Amino acid sequence: MKAIWKVGKEDPRRVVHSMKVGTALVLVSLLYLLEPLFNGIGKNAMWAVMTVVVVMEFTVGATLCKGLNRGLGTLLAGSLAFLIKYFADAPGRIFQAVYIGVSVFMIGALTTYVRFIPSIKKNYDYGVLIFLLTFNLITVSSYRVNDVWDFAKDRISTIAIGCGLCLLMSILVFPNWSGEELHNNTISRLEGLANSIQVCITGYFYDSAKQATEGDSSENPIYEGYKAVLDSKVKDETLASQASWEPRFSRYCHRTPWHQYTRVGAALRQFSYTVVALHGCLQSEIQTPKSISTLYKDSCIRLGEEVSKVLRELANSIRNKRQFSPQTLSRNLKDALQDLHSALKSQPQLVLGSRNGRTQTPKTAVQAVPHPHPDQKLEEDTKFSFSSVRNGSRGSGCQSVEHSRELTRKVLRPQMSMSAIISLEFSEALPFAAFTSLLVEMVAKLDYVMDEVDELGIIAHFEEFQGDEIVVTCEKPNINKPQNDLPSYGAE
Amino acid sequence: MKAIWKVGKEDPRRVVHSMKVGTALVLVSLLYLLEPLFNGIGKNAMWAVMTVVVVMEFTVGATLCKGLNRGLGTLLAGSLAFLIKYFADAPGRIFQAVYIGVSVFMIGALTTYVRFIPSIKKNYDYGVLIFLLTFNLITVSSYRVNDVWDFAKDRISTIAIGCGLCLLMSILVFPNWSGEELHNNTISRLEGLANSIQVCITGYFYDSAKQATEGDSSENPIYEGYKAVLDSKVKDETLASQASWEPRFSRYCHRTPWHQYTRVGAALRQFSYTVVALHGCLQSEIQTPKSISTLYKDSCIRLGEEVSKVLRELANSIRNKRQFSPQTLSRNLKDALQDLHSALKSQPQLVLGSRNGRTQTPKTAVQAVPHPHPDQKLEEDTKFSFSSVRNGSRGSGCQSVEHSRELTRKVLRPQMSMSAIISLEFSEALPFAAFTSLLVEMVAKLDYVMDEVDELGIIAHFEEFQGDEIVVTCEKPNINKPQNDLPSYGAE
C-alpha cells in the first residue's frame, strides 16, 4: 500500500499517465460500443482496443516508436503475406497447407534471427515481432478464410486507428517527452554531483567524526547525489533511442543531439567514480588530525566549491540552452588549484616540527602527530591524477584530456625543480594526501565533462555565450604571486 | 550482411533458437491447418499462434516468465470480467454501455498505475499488460456477443495451448537456461579480469613504451577483459530475475542463489574500477625509468599473478560448484604482498644515491633519475587502499572489508614505527608509486569479491572444500623472514 502511494508521490505524471490510458481505452471502446461506428468497422474494432493497450507508453518517444513499429510491421507483413499467397493460390489443398507451413517456418526462423542483430534490436524489435505476428495471422488464416483481403485491410486500418489515438493522446494531452526527461536527468545529475561534492568536502573538515559514526542515514545527501549517475548507462541509452523518434529539435539541426547526451552521461559516470572515492575518504577510520587539515581547510573547500560551481554552471548551460565559457570556468578552477598549492606551500615550519619530534622520540613515532610536507603532497597528487585521468578517458574510449593536464601541469611544473629533504612519517597525513589527490583528480576529470557539454552546446546549437552572463563570484583572497616564488625555490 | 553473419557466429545458439521458433510456429499452425484439430478448437486457434509468437523467448526462464504471466493474466482478467458482467447484466442498453465504459476506465487506469510499482514491474509487467488486454477484450465484447463465456473459454484454452507448446519447446529442445548464462557470465568475467590483470602487469614492465604508441588495437586484451564487467548491472539483474522463474536448484536449497550472483557481480564491478585505473597507469605518458621499475618487477608480477590466480580459483570454484579455501588464497596473497614489501625495502642504497645526486646538481634534478624510497611508497599505498576500499564497499551498500584491512595492516604495520629521511624528487617515481598503490588496493578489493563468492558457495551448497584439491604452485623465492626484521626496524 505504501509502495503504491510512493510511486505516485515520486512522480505525479504517473497518475496523469494512468488517467490518459484509461481515457484512451474508453475512447477506443466507443468504436465497438456506439452503433454507427460499429457498423462502419465491425467486430475487428477489437484490434484497435488491443493496439491501444499495447502501444500506449509513458513518453511520446516510446509511444511513437511502438506505434510506428506496429504500423509498419503490420503493413509489411500484409504485403508479404499477399505476395506469398499469390504464388500459392493455384494447386490443391494439401500442397497449399505444406506451402503455408514452409513459409511460416522460414519467415518465423528468419525474423527471430534478425531480432538478434543489435541495430534491429535497438529500434525495431517490436516492429519485427508484429511483422511475424501479422504475417502468421494472415498466412494461416488464408487457408480457411476466403476474404483474407478484407481481414488484412481490417487489421491494418484498426491498428492505424489505435496507433493514431495513442499518438494523439500522448502528444496532445500532458505529453511526456523522452528527450526532455533525458535533458532533465542530465541536469539533475550534474546538480546532484555538485551537492555531493560540497557536502562531502564540508563534512570532511567540520564533522568527519560525526559522519563516520552515524553511518548510512547521514550519508544520504552525499550518496543520493551520485548514486543516480553510477548505473545510468542503460537508462540513458533507452531514453536517447526513444527521444530519437520524437519530432523535436529537428528544426534546429541535422542530427538530433540525443547521442551527445549519452556521451555527457558517460563522462559524468567517469567523474562520479572519483566522487565515490572522495566519499570513501570521509568514511575512512584513519583520519588526519584536525590540527593538520584545518590549515588547508579554506583552500580545499574553495576548490570543492569551484568544482561544484562549474557543475552547476554546466547544469545551467544545459537548462538555459546557452553555451558557457570554458576559459572562464577553467581560469577559476586554476585559481583555486593555485590557491590550494599556495596554502600547502605556506606552512614550511611543519617539516621542521615533524623532523624534530621524530628524532627525539623515534619509538613513539606512531603516536606522534606527523606533518605532511605540503609540496610533496601536491606534486604527488598531480602526478597521480595524470595517470588516473588518462585511464578514465581511455576506458570510455574518449580522446585526450590535453587541456586538464596542461592546466595542472602549468600550476605545478615549477615545483619539480625544487629539492628538499623531509621526514617520512606519513602515516596520519596520508588520508589527507589521498583526499587532496582525489580533489585534483576530480578537477582533471571535470575537464572532460566540460568538453562533452561544450560539444553538446555546439551540436544542439545552444545560444552563444555572452561574456557578462556569468558572474564570477569567487575572488582569490591571498595568492602570493607564485610565478615569482618559483625561481627562488628552484635555487634553494 | 556481415552483421547478420556475426550474430550467428558469436553465439550459435541463436541459430538454433530461430529454428525452434520456426518449428513451434509450424506446430501451432497445425491447430488451424489440420481438419480434426480445427474442428475441435475453431478459428480461435489464431490465439495460440499469436501466443507462440509473443511468448517464445531465448531462455527457459524468460519463456516461463512470459508464459505464466500471460496465462495468469488471462485467467484473472477473465474472472474479473465475469464478475463485472454479472453485476451489469440486469438493466437497459445505455446503462450497460456506460457501465462498461466506467469499468474499462477504472481498470485501465489502475493497472497502468500498478505497472509503475517496481516489484510488479520487475516480474509481472507482462502479466498485468495481458490482464488489461484480456479484460478489455471480454468486457467490451460482452456488449454485443452473447456467448462471451465461450469466447473467454476459447481465449484461455488457446493461450494455454500456445504457452504449453512454447514451454515444451524451450525446456525439451536444446534449452537455454538464464541461470546457466548468469553462472557462465560470472565465470567468464572472473577469468577476463584475471587475464586483464596479467597482461596489464606484464605489459607495464616489458613493453609499456610499445603499448603506449600502438594505441587502441593493442589494448584489446586488457580492455576486452574488463569491459564486460563495467556495465553488467542491468544484464545481471535481468538474468537473475528470469532465472528465478526456472525450476532448477530448488532441490538443493530453499532460496535459489541467483540473487547472490548479482552480489558477486556488484563486487566484481567495484573491483574492475581498480583494473581500469591500473590500465590507465600503462597508458600514462609519464613513465618511471626502467632502471627503477625493473628492481621491483618480479615482486609486482608475482603479486599480479597471485591476484589472477585467486580470480581463476574463484572462477573454478563457481564452475565446479566446489567451495574454496579463503585462508589458503589469502595466505598466498599475503606472501606476495610481503614479497613486494621486502623487495621495496631491500634497495636502501637508492636513497643515498638519489640524495647525493641531488645535492650535487640541484638545478638539473628534473633530468636526473630519481629514486623512490621504497618504504614510504608502500606505506602510502596501503593507507591509500584503506580509504579506497572503504568507499568501494560503502558505495555498493555492503559491509566491512575487515579481513582485507587486517591482511594489509598485518603486513605493513611494523613499518609505521620506522623513521627515515629521504629526498623529495618524486616526479618520475610517482607513476610507479601509483601503480603499486593500485596493486595493493586491488588486493583489498579482491577480498570483498572473495567474501561474496564464499557466501555464494554457502547459499548454493557447493561441495565442501577438500584440502588437497588446491595446488599451491606459487613458491616464495626469497623472503627475508620479515617478521624477524621488524623489531630491529622499530628500534632504528
Image: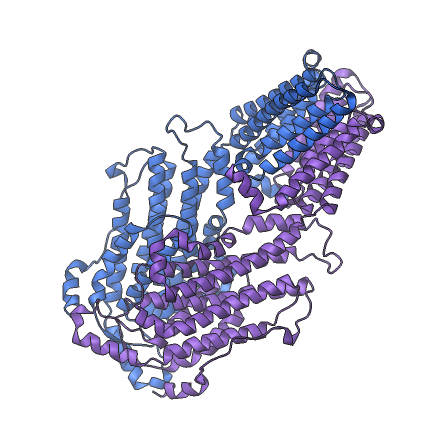
Chain colours: A purple, B blue
**Quarter of the image that includes the C terminus of chain B:** bottom left
Q: Position of residue A92 (x, y in %)?
A: 79, 16
Is there any visible trace of residue B75 in the rendered image?
yes
Report the front residue among A452 and A177.
A177
Task: Tell me the quarter of the picture where residue B460 sits.
Answer: top left
Is there any visible trace of residue B191 in the rendered image?
no
Report the front residue among A453 and B365.
A453
Residue at the spot 34% in from the left edge and 46% down from the top edge:
B450
Task: Tell me the quarter of the picture where residue A39 sits.
Answer: top right
Residue at the spot 78% in from the left edge and 30% down from the top edge:
A30
Q: Position of residue B412 (x, y in %)?
A: 24, 60
**Quarter of the image that includes the N terminus of chain B:** top right
Indicate left or right for B351 with B147 as reference. left
- In the image, is residue A85 above or below residue A312? above
Indicate left or right for A286 with B16 as reference. left
Q: Position of residue B164 (x, y in %)?
A: 57, 21
